[in-house]
């Protein structure tokens, strides 16, 4: 049985719980709420036709989530980020509710307001468009868990940790928060 098709119930007793880690980069410009860079997904097999963070992707074996964020910005947008320019926004523990290991996620969202280069689509087979949108005027549709982060960001209510998909059948997201320090990734606690 592959890891993708194994359910949490198929895990041997005492086996580690598996999560798929991903890094998301929210490029922002302007004062106040400003604008965020979004790409229109296509050809990915997951929520194609939805707008999403300008750069995002799975953490690869042997790299940190910060290294993944820098790599994804380079690969998807053609921009260079310094790890010190990344500001942690929140972590999200997300479940697709299927019981499949592939649907259990740990997402890490970062904001960047400084980068080198002009953002441009680098993977035309995976994104149909790339545009700046006012944070208070997002397009439709946006990938739901990413919209949740962007809406909290706009309201100034973004918690350090969000837990999504663990709710009962009433489909209301359960949001747990913890205090967050306001410092860049490379800063001290």
Image: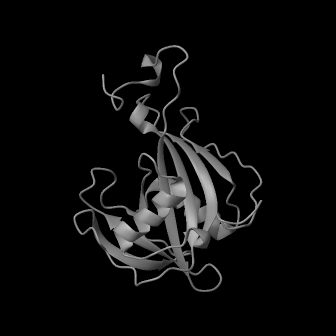
Up-down: is 146 above or below 138?
above
Q: Could you tell me residue 7's position as x and y percent?
A: 41, 24
Up-down: is 169 above or below 7?
below
The quarter of the image holding the N terminus is: top left
Q: Report the residue that reaches farthest toward the top.
A: 13
Q: In which quarter of the image is residue 108?
A: bottom right
Q: Could you tell me residue 125's position as x and y percent?
A: 22, 64
- Is residue 79 rendered to the left or right of residue 187? left
Q: Which residue is drawn at 74% across and 57% down?
A: 180
Relative depth, front residue between 108 and 155: 108
Relative depth, front residue between 43 and 110: 110
Q: Report the residue that reaches farthest toward the front.
A: 62
Relative depth, front residue between 178 and 59: 59
- Is residue 78 rendered to the left or right of residue 53? left
Q: In this rendering, does residue 53 appear at all?
A: no
Q: In this rendering, does residue 94 appear at all?
A: yes
Q: In which quarter of the image is residue 10?
A: top left
The quarter of the image holding the C terminus is: bottom right
Up-down: is 46 above or below 122?
above
């Amino acid at each position: 049985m592959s890891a993708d098709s194994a359910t949490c119930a198929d895990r041997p007793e005492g086996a580690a719980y598996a999560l798929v880690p991903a890094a998301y980069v929210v490029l922002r410009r302007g004062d106040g709420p400003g604008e965020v860079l979004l790409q229109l997904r296509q050809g990915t097999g997951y929520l194609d036709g939805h707008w999403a963070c300008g750069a995002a992707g799975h953490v690869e074996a042997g790299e940190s989530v910060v290294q993944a964020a820098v790599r994804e910005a380079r690969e998807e947008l053609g921009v260079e980020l310094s790890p010190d320019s990344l500001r942690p926004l929140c972590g999200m523990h997300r479940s697709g509710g299927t019981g499949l290991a592939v649907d259990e996620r740990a997402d890490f969202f970062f904001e960047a307001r400084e980068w080198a280069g002009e953002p441009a689509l680098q993977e035309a087979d995976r994104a149909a468009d790339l545009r700046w949108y006012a944070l208070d005027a997002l397009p439709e549709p946006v990938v739901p868990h990413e919209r949740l982060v962007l809406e909290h960001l706009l309201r100034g209510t973004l918690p350090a940790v969000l837990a999504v998909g663990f709710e009962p059948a009433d489909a209301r997201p359960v949001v747990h928060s913890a205090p967050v320090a306001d410092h860049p990734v490379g800063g001290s606690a």
